[in-house]
Image (cartoon, rainbow, N blue to C red):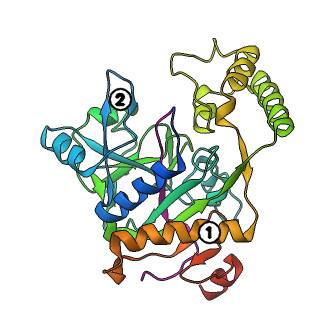
Amino acid sequence: MKQPMDINQEGNAYTVISWEYPTPLVEEKISRLESILRYGLLGTAFTQREGNFGVKINKADYDRLLAEGNKMSVFFHIVGRLENDDPYSRNVGEPPARIDENHALFNGNLTQVGVLFNLSTFRENYSPNKFRGKEDSMRDDGINGVYQPYHDWNEVRGKNYVDEDYGFVISPMIPREQFTGIIFKSSQPLTPSEYEKRIEELVIETKASRLKINRLYLSGFPFKPAYNEEELTPQKIKEELLRCREYKYSQEESNPEKLAHRAKEIAEEQLKANGNQSDLLVPIYDIHGNMWWPERISYDQLRAKE
């Protein structure tokens, strides 16, 4: 069993399991987690014609795509490496942004699951001029085991700080031996009145700031990629949100019994994948850093042990 840790420790790497619309089922994500724990975080292939990334990958597809010469990539974030974490934006002694503050990843409308992993065996590419954009970075042959910003970053004092919408990328996969923890966020649907209120807030927010469509997409609303920022008027947003009522926005679950049940579900998947290899088992945390498995320890208690 890996040692308990402060999930918000600077330098921790993490990624969140995504899913395909229009069926973002909790059951599907649970089965994907079991596969990831068994085989590692397998990279996905960039398809330039489609303009997006595959979000479902199994071991057979991964092996086939890799053998065909595709560049397989895993996308992730690092604690302390967001744009606002750089030394010129953060006050001396101020901690980096916590994982639960990264809205681009843990802001979906259903239960989210993330995987923490160790980057110590990988090397970072510190060359800020090597990649000019996401398409260029994906076309580059790259070096396996070297990670770099995916798109939009600043280099400050020898470190890359990235836009929270993009993060870092590495090829071709992250071995399960590198995993250090699992993070979950449990949520419950908003009531109809709360949902209507949230729609109005999003419309006002978008009207004021021209919120980018990908932020709404990552927030759990299945907007078609065909929409561009100019076409996405406040009225269009409201129409789309109301039309997609089945993708109800959610609020965070706070019931301890439900959180404990969620942790138990994840633990069962982990034991199914690696139960006979105790050295591969990892602690399970909620998004705020409290440990729920193999025992319950509060975030403050974990920090006190550091």
Query: Quarter-wise, where is residue 238 in the image?
Result: top right
Residue drawn 29% across the image and 61% down it = 39
Query: Badge 2 local density, few (<14 within 10 Å), some, or many (20+)?
Result: some
Q: In this view, does 241 lie to the left or right of 163?
A: right
The secondary structure type at the circle numbered 1 is: helix
- Relative to 115, is 166 above or below? above
Residue 271 appears at what percent x and percent y? 40, 74
Residue 231 visible here: yes
Q: Quadrant of residue 149?
A: top left
Secondary structure beneath disc 2? helix
Quarter of the figure with residue 248:
top right
On the image, the x and y values in percent for residue 277 come to 31, 80
User: Looking at numbered disc 2 in the image, what kind of residue is underneath it?
Assistant: Glu
Q: How far apart are marks 2 and 1 (CA)?
A: 42 Å
154 inside magenta stretch: no
Q: Is residue 196 above or below residue 147?
A: above
Q: Residue at x 57, y 53 (%)?
A: 112
Q: Residue 261 carries which label?
A: 1
**Of label 2 and label 1, which has the lower sequence position?**
2
| Position in image of residue 261 (x %, y %) | 62, 69
Pointer 2 residue: 135
Amino acid of disc 1: His
Q: In which quarter of the image is the C terminus?
A: bottom right
Name the residue rendered at 68%, 84% in the picture.
Answer: 301
Magenta range: 1-21
Residue 175 seen anywhere in this rendered image of the structure: no
| Total residue callouts | 2
Badge nearest the viewer, 2 or 1: 1
In this picture, residue 33 sits left or right of residue 300: left
Q: Residue 142 carries which label?
A: none
Which quarter shows the N terminus?
Answer: bottom left
Q: Residues within 10 Å of mark 1 (few under 14, many from 20)?
A: few
